[in-house]
């Protein structure tokens, strides 16, 4: 009987500790991931929608990429489109370094799986309150090729994150 009680206490302690770590992310305003199942198709535009009510304080905006050793390039090109409630749409073409010169992947994680938190906009103040939409698509192509890759291997998840600065 005491073993059962001890096991329950350990389980409750572990769950409480896990909840504490998850809830301690005070900077997080918005954080969402969408899966690619290990292959990111060019036509699979990732779309994130969120409500913003704060136009006074600055935020940091990130694109998060989870990838593995199947990723064939040392960089990543993205097209990020942000639409605000007023109907204005801003389009950015971004390039990120994803691997060291020796081919080892950058980012956080163990073994062949890495997560990269890539700056999209720093100290950004939202111009108006309301619903915002962010669309992310890849624009990767091999050196010397005009046509981009229709299927990007090694990317398992694409995310978008907004953090409070203060």
Image (cartoon, helix red, strand yellow):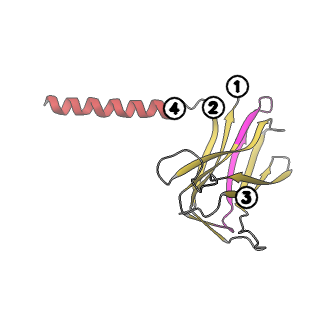
Residue 48 at what x, y percent from top left? 67, 51
Give me the C-alpha separation between circle 1 and circle 2. Answer: 8 Å
Q: Residue at x 59, y 46 (%)?
A: 107
Instruction: Give the Cα separation between the discs numbered 4 and 3.
Output: 32 Å
| N-terminal-most mark, 1 or 2 | 2
What residue is disc 3 on?
Answer: 77
Q: Is residue 133 visible?
A: yes
The image shows residue 50, relative to residue 43, as above or below, that is above
Residue found at x 80% / y 29%: 56
State which quadrant residue 126 falls in: top right
Does 52 lie within the magenta span? Answer: yes
Which badge, 4 or 1, is on the more N-terminal residue?
4
Looking at the picture, how far across and down is residue 142, in whole percent? 71, 69
Residue of label 4: 23
In the rendered image, the vertical position of residue 166 relative to residue 63, given as above or below: above
Q: Are marks 1 and 3 in contact (CB under 8 Å)?
A: no
Assess disc 1: are there few (<14), some (14-19) or many (≥20) residues with their C-alpha within 10 Å of its C-alpha: few
Badge nearest the viewer, 4 or 1: 1
Q: Are marks 2 and 4 in contact (CB under 8 Å)?
A: no
Q: Please give the range of residues in magenta.
A: 41-61
Q: Residue 120 magenta-drawn?
A: no
Residue identified by numbered label 1: 166
Residue hosting label 2: 27
Q: CA distance from mark 3 to mark 2?
A: 27 Å
- CA separation, marks 1 and 3? 30 Å
Which comes sooner in the sequence, label 3 or label 2? Answer: 2
């Amino acid at each position: 009987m005491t073993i059962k009680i001890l096991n329950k206490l350990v389980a409750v302690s572990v769950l409480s500790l896990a909840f504490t770590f998850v809830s301690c992310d005070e900077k997080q305003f918005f954080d969402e991931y969408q899966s690619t199942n290990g292959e990111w198709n060019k036509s699979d535009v990732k779309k994130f929608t969120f409500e913003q009510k704060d136009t006074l304080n600055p935020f940091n905006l990130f694109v998060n990429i989870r990838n593995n050793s199947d990723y064939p390039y040392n960089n990543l090109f993205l097209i990020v489109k942000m639409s605000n409630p007023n109907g204005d749409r801003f389009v950015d073409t971004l390039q990120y370094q994803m691997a060291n010169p020796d081919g080892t992947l950058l980012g956080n994680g163990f073994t062949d799986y890495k997560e990269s938190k890539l700056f999209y906009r720093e100290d950004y103040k939202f111009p108006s309150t309301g619903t915002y939409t962010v669309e992310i698509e890849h624009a990767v192509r091999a050196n010397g090729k005009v046509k981009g890759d229709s299927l990007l291997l090694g990317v398992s998840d694409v995310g978008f994150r907004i953090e409070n600065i203060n």
